[in-house]
Amino acid sequence: MGDDSEWQKLPTEEKCQHKVWKARVAGYEEATKLFRGLDEKSQEFSRYAGLMKKFVTDSNAVAQEKGLDAVLAFIENASTNICGRTCHDVVSGVVTKCLNASKQKTKEKGMEIIMLYVEAEKPDIVQECLMTGMENKQPKVVVGCVQTVTMALRDFGTKVIQVKPLLKLLPKLLDDRDKNVREETKQLVIELYRWIGAALKPQMTNFKPIQVQEFEGEFEKLPPGKPVQSRFMRSQQELKAKIEEQAAAAEGTGDGGGDGGANEEEAIDPFDLMTAVDILEKLPKNFYEQIEAKKWQERKEVLEAVQKLSENPKLENGDYSALLRAVLKVIAKDTNVMLVALAGKTVSGIANGLRKKYQPYAVMSVSTILEKFKEKKAAVVAALRDAIDASFQATNLEAIMEEVTAALDNKNPSIKAETALFLSRCFARCTQSSLPKKMLKAYCAPLLKTVNESDPAVREASFQALGTAMKVVTEKNIAPFLVDVDNIKMQKIQESCEKAVLLNAKGEPRGGGGASAAPAAAPAKRPSTAPPAKSGSEEPKPVKRPGTAKPAAGGAAKAKPKAKAPPKKGKKGPVEEKMESVLSDEAVEEKAQDFLPGDTLTNLASANWKERLAAMEGMVKVVSSTGKDDIPCQVCIRVLSKKPGLKETNFQVLKLKLELVAHLSRNAKFTKRSAEFCLADIVDKLGDAKNGAAAKDCLTGMSEALGLDFVCTEAMARAFENKNPKIQQEALTWLSTAVQEFGLKINVKGILPVVSKALAATNPGVRSAAIALLGVMYMYMGDTLRVLFDNEKPALLQQIDAEFEKVKGVNPPAPTRKVMSAGGKDDEEDEDGEENGEENEGEVPVQDLVPRNDISEKITEALLTELADKNWKVRAEALQKVTTILSEAKFVTPNLGSLPEALKARLGESNKNLQMVTIGILQTLATALGPHCKGHVKVVGPGLLACLADSKPALREKVVACLNAWVENTSLLPLVECEALHDALKMENPFLKAELLGWLSLKLPSHKQLPVELRATIPSVLAALEDRNADVRKKAGEALVPFMIHTGYDAFLKALGKCKPSSKDQIQPMLEKARGELPAKPVKTKKAASAPSSGPAAPRPSAPKSAPAAPPADYEEEDEPTAAAPAKAESKAKVVKGKAKGKAAPPSSSKKKEEEDFGPTMTMTVMKEQRVKEEKAMKILKWNFLELKQEYVEQLRNQMEKNFNRAVMADLFHTDFKSHIKAIEQLIKCIETQEKETINNLDLLLKWVTIRFYDTNPSMLNKALDYLQRLFSLLSDIQYHLTDLEANSFIPYLLLKSGDPKDNVRRDVRNILKMICKVLPACKMFSFLIDGLKCKVAKQRTELLDELGCLIDSYGMNVCQPSPAHALKIIAAQIGDRDNAVRNAALNTIVVAYTILGETVYKYIGHLNDKDQSLLDERIKRAMKNREMKPAAKEPVQAQPPPQQQQQRPKTTPGGGPMAKAASQPNMGSRPPVNKAYQLDIEIDDWEPVYPSLIELDLDSVMAPITKPKLMARPASPMSAKLVSSTDVSSSISSVVVQISSVDINTCVKALAQIDEVMKDPQKVDALADHVDKLLVVITMQNRLGISMHVQDPSVDRHQVVCLYRCLLSTLISIFNKTSLGKKASTHILMDLIQSLLTVLLDPHIDQLQDGSQIIKSVNLTVVKIINKSDPTNITCANIALMRECLKSDTCSKKFLELVIKCLWKNMNLIPATIEELNCDRLLYESHLFFQQFPSSSWRTRPNLDLPIRTVKTLLHNLTKLKGHKILSHTGLISASEESEVEGYLHTVLAKSKTDEGSADKSKIPPKNKRVSKTHELLTEIFKKIGTKENTREGLNDLFDFKKKFPEADMNPFLKKTAPSFQKYISNMLAEIEEERRGSKATGNYSHNSISDDSANVTSEAENFDVDFYREKLRELRAKCGLDNNSGEGQTSDSNRTSGSKTSALVPETSDGAETPETEIQDRVAESRQEEEPRQSVDVSVLRARLDRIKKMSKS
């Protein structure tokens, strides 16, 4: 486009890529304006993102500058994500093209772009690119990169720019040859020093001395103060505002030190910049041998070597355990003090080098060193001090508490003194938060002992430690632990407190203290890596201000701001996030002044109580009127705590203070930090006569805010530290009330010591309060609590038992209070509270609250050996030891070692006394284990049951009591599962049978449902009914009903069938009698108990276990018996609560009957949406279970009670199936009368039906299925859409019934599944069916596979989820199933998929074993054979085609499309072979024709003139208007795309019409962009369906098939006509699409259609359109991949492969025009994959590889010619590229191009014969023309003229490499031109191309319509007359036409960069000949003459 007016019309995006630089300038300017006006989320940014690199690397300087402006605007306005995508490319381009620019403005803009990318959150990528640029060979680029890094560091600081990577490059840059590089690097070093200071100096050791000296001078010139960040990333806007505020404040006060103080903590630790050294690898090889050597010199030698290694400042992490054990062993045991000191230095060095990574070894080191402090040598002690201090930095005080307290209790005074000094140094590094009261108390106790030591050194060290601790936590907090210290010692501690110097994390004094006071052992040379986080309330001024009145308080004020540093600190409270930082006293005062009015603070501290009262009233008003988020809670609490604080003497003021604290706890953000300032004083006021109630209310309010556990623990500890019994009594009373209000939400383990202390108190009020508290706890814990106080005095136990007796059987009250959420959102948790309250009222995890002891260590091997000793006395002693262990432990953990096995062996003891003792131990063990004994039942259970065989009744009673203890803590389930009951009942001992059956008859009725394994005991029970022992028979008769409750009557009946006939007659009546006694309502008392839900008490935990959840259906036909005796047994087995509520059941049921007729069956009280919301919020159980549990039934009952009539509820959840049928009948009526209510409660109804699926009564099940069919019929009528919640809670359980053994059930399930598909997307149903294949029931899998086949057949392959490949793999796995029905179903389903996909189905299925594969092949073969036989039988009798046409359809492509084979073509007359470019030479043998009798035809109709039909567009679908008018186009398109995949042609055509309507709407066409791949997939599928199904189906009208293909191809052309849509197609989609289209092109059935030739032309046009309009990278990769698949496939025909290669050549012709769009990396990778499978050398073994390999190499050759050496940078996707054949070929081409260039230079030498050179050049130009498609004729004319002018010219060099056919073609054409010029032959010479590159040649087609028509008529007549062989000419012409129409548009064009240009010219000319020869051989007059002859023959 040379004219400016032409490119000015282009859109901006094309202007930016235009070849004319002015156009690009205009495009950049427009893009800049566009970017500045867009929102950051605009899609326009994504469109231009890929062009950004081109903007900055523009070759034109003017355009580049404009491009940089556009990029600046792009980065400023685009989102962070989009900027991140372009960052690497753009910054790399700036580095290489802008930073070395000669124009300063360009360089500055490039640097600004880099800065903007840093602001856009991409500093890492920017720094990486800049560091890469620093290694560039151009000094200008290096200088620019260094300058940019310096600028970024100056503006953004070290938080954004990483310093460590830069340090490695500095030495190299400082030694660079270029002076500018060195100078800029110096500036970078200076800038680094400004930010990191002295941390840089250790890294300067690699610099030259003169450089270091120069830098030292520069550093001194720098101004003081820390640098401040001036530019900020987008995420740092808050930091920016904060720094600006600090700067403004500093200017206002004139203090410039604020910033420095703020940034001090942000300084970089030099330790982080150091390189770690791995000393473990450098250890002496013989270290571990030498360290144990006897000579101390050898030990010293290796220790010195290790000590030298440990001096490295930073060590690599590793396993130092072995090394440290060896070194610490030297410290502990070596007698040479020199070696001890050396080992101490080694430990110190390792600890300092590892820092926090030394933590695993710290405790071990501290323990060893403390023991060694007995050494008196000063040098050794100093080394040990350094070592222990370094070790402490890796741990904390809590971890070393045990070792330190033990050392303080050591007898050696030196150890005590040094330990106390060590503690002092540790305390100096602590803060108030890291030294909590709990830890302080633990350390103060031993230190208070050592202050009384006789040794003065120990006393002084202890004073120092306590003084340091006092300074850390303040005198107020440590005072409670120093109560017993006399005044003199307290004075000493306070003096030490004043002298103490607290250290920060770096080991430096805090608050500017003197350095001389710092301990010598603090290693200051290695600062901490984690400086404390800056507190939000910390201000610079208070930090610098010295302490005022009290030294301790002042010290604390300085320490408090740093107390926030460890964010993880906090007690065990559940709300960790509420821990806040401690405000300094100055901050509190300042904030209080701002919050409180006037002189409130002054008056609160006034001596006049009236002023204090007025001030409190004012404060109360202010707080009450302030919102929750605005109240500074900590400030208010600390103001109230200021002197006199809560120790106020005036009761009125105190009352207001306490009420205000309670208000704050409930209406402000009350945290544990706030509680710490007031909780102790509030507890002290519990005993106040007037304000005690207010103090209790404060504690209650705090419990609501912080949790009862936290407040209870702190309050009890404070109360019992106080000596006032009144306070202790009131604290216990408050706790009793709080437990009843909150529930047992306390740590029972922690409270038990307090209660024990209270019980031992001398004050009777305290004891009474403790006993009352135990009574409250007993309601929750039961008898478990009693066991914990067995060791109390008998008198006290009597009082406790009396209190327990008062509350025995009383249910704990429902909680009335609860802990507020973190945000205080109480209203949002009301519903949770109600639900959780019901769940947690009665059920407390008691066993988790009980403290358990691990006795595994006491069960030693010696004890186990004694238990197995032969001497009974030794065994008796061992058993006594076990008894003692259990009695001491009370409750134990399940870790018992081998004790259960040992006790089991003692159960077979011959000594009966020892056997009794063992049984008693086991009974105690069951109680001690609690529910944890379940794992041991299987071990001891069989042994206990065997003991029932003993003849002594006392022993059997003992065994029964023991069994009861075990079963009460677990259940009978373990005994059933391990078959212990089965084995025991098989024994012949009558005592055992009688006792066991009697025990089971008592346990089974009230036990929960037992598994089917219990049925194994039935034969033994039946045998016991005929036992010789009368007692056994009696017990067996009593056990029948309990057993039947769990196993059912049918199980006994089946077992009876195996008995002897005589036995049957005796046992049958017993069974019938027991059947009549079976309880019809085994859970009646439970239902009655749960009915009055309004009561405050929840059911006891044992209630759900009282009876089986649902009775077996074995006795379903019986009426409801009363079963009085079993009912009584159940009620006895329950708790008192169950009995009381059991009596109330009859009145409640009568009330239900009275209310039955007053309300509708169901209502809409609670909407479905509310239930969905609750389930999503996990407030209720998700309806997902493998085994139905009672908790799900209860939950459903609770949900349905709100919306269903009580009478219906009684029937729905009745235990009798008849009631269920009655309820279903009512629900069926509701379908007609209460439609809305049914829809609203649909989820509940479906869940209820799933419960019924677990019942086995057939009548009820049939009724339920009938109801479901009616229900889903209603849903489909109203077009209801089933929600995911409803589907997930119903369909999986419905599928379980698909495997039912009854045919009618399976039939109903199939009908229901079909109905569900009308209200649920088929793809979702498919997912459920696929998941159902995991079941083990063969019938179910068979049914599901059949359903899957139906879905695929009805909805196509798109229904397969998550993908067809995944689904077909799962289905194919069923082929190997053992069940024949499953195998057949799986095979049938895959056959259905095969009819749609063809051979692709094998690709999706993957590898099968040989057997399965053979089964599948055979089934497909048989199915396809049957499929083809059906249409053959229906065909009318016509002239039969040759036998070859009756063959089966030829083999298919790898994707399933058929390939054209020679055998499938009709027989043709013999003709000479015609070699065409990339086509097969097809030779057909002659055959003798058989001349049948001629048929008389109406030739007038044949000769009638032809009228061309008018072209009409297909009518728009009636649904298209709806689609176009729809607002949600995207969702509508998805549904329409699914319709395109329909097997029904009409549905597909209508859907395609809708898509066409959308594409016509410019506003909605963009909505198709996200659906292009899906659309192309279904079109591909339809292409294959047309060939595999429609064309071969005789019932399908052929016109419909033609219409289908026209619509499909029209839609494809429309898609690819729109560039925005066509380029969205992905590679694998294009591959399948091209494959399907080429398959259609070659399929013989298409030719047989009436308009088959037109379809072929349209397909040809479509393929060309796709190649031209799709993404060039995707289509090229698709063609290469398709060619690769063809070569791998054994079924791919050569014809198909040739067409694929032609498509690839078509792509290559477009490469020069699309080179900028091509992703060369992907093309090279695809070529790499090709050569991996088919190396260049493989063509020798496979001749058909020659052309594909040359084609791919030509592609690589063209790319290399176009890209040059840059092509090598695109091999990044190829792994191990040095082994890749692609890269080797690229190097070869590049080397050859260099050689060609050299030869070209040599050719410039003047030749000897200039005329030869001239003719050679002319011939070259002529043959180039011949090789060009449009200039072929002109080139031939020029060649003719050339030969005339230069007859002696030699053309052999140009023709010798070409094929003979090409040479013959040249000769023929030259002869023809000669004849034309002579006028001897007039031939209409025109070139015809069936389909051009861009559009069909409509004009040419219209002009030649008559010729085609007559040719077709002639062909038909010849076929009918049997004259095909007599006219070879016509047949040849016809064949040429067909072949040309199929392939002409796919012939490749010439590529300038091809390896063999002569071959390409030959191919081009051959192609032209191929296109021209058919037209030249056709003459209308000849056709007319032939028709005349035929006419005459017919008349004769």
Image (cartoon, helix red, strand yellow):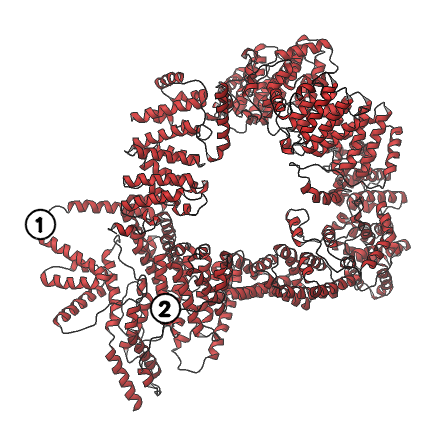
Please name whichever residue, 1207 or 1387, is drawn nearer the observer in this view of the structure. Answer: 1207
In percent of the image, x 37 and y 67: which residue is there? 1641
Is residue 50 found left or right of 59 in the rendered image? right
Is residue 145 found left or right of 1375 in the rendered image? left
Position of the C terminus by quadrant: bottom left
Helix, strand or loop under label 2: helix
Q: Is residue 1285 visible?
A: yes
Q: Could you say where residue 151 lies in the image, as x and y percent from the top left?
A: 38, 28
Asked if 496 appears above or below 1108 in the picture, the reply is: above
Please identify the residue farthest to the bottom as the structure is shown. Answer: 1996
Disc number for residue 1656: 2
Q: Earlier in the sequence, mark 2 or mark 1?
A: 2
Q: Is residue 1858 visible?
A: no
Amino acid carrying mark 1 in the image: Lys
Q: Could you say where residue 1395 lies in the image, as x and y percent from the top left?
A: 49, 67
Please name whichever residue, 1750 or 49, is drawn nearer the observer in this view of the structure. Answer: 49
Amino acid carrying mark 2 in the image: Ile
Please name whichever residue, 1153 or 1713, is drawn nearer the observer in this view of the structure. Answer: 1153
Is residue 1763 found left or right of 1818 in the rendered image? right
Asked if the residue under mark 1 is in contact with the one under mark 2, i.e. CB atoms within 8 Å, the reply is no
Residue 1957, quarter of the rendered image: bottom left
Query: Circle 1: is it few (<14), some (14-19), or many (20+) Cα within 10 Å?
Result: few
Asked if 963 appears above or below 447 in the picture, the reply is: below
Helix, strand or loop under label 1: loop
Q: Could you say where residue 1553 lies in the image, as x and y percent from the top left?
A: 45, 65
Please identify the residue farthest to the right as the structure is shown. Answer: 1030
Q: Could you say where residue 1913 lies in the image, as x and y percent from the top left?
A: 33, 79
Distance from the alpha carbon under mark 2 to that under mark 1: 56 Å
Residue 1917, quarter of the rendered image: bottom left
Q: Which residue is mark 1?
A: 1808
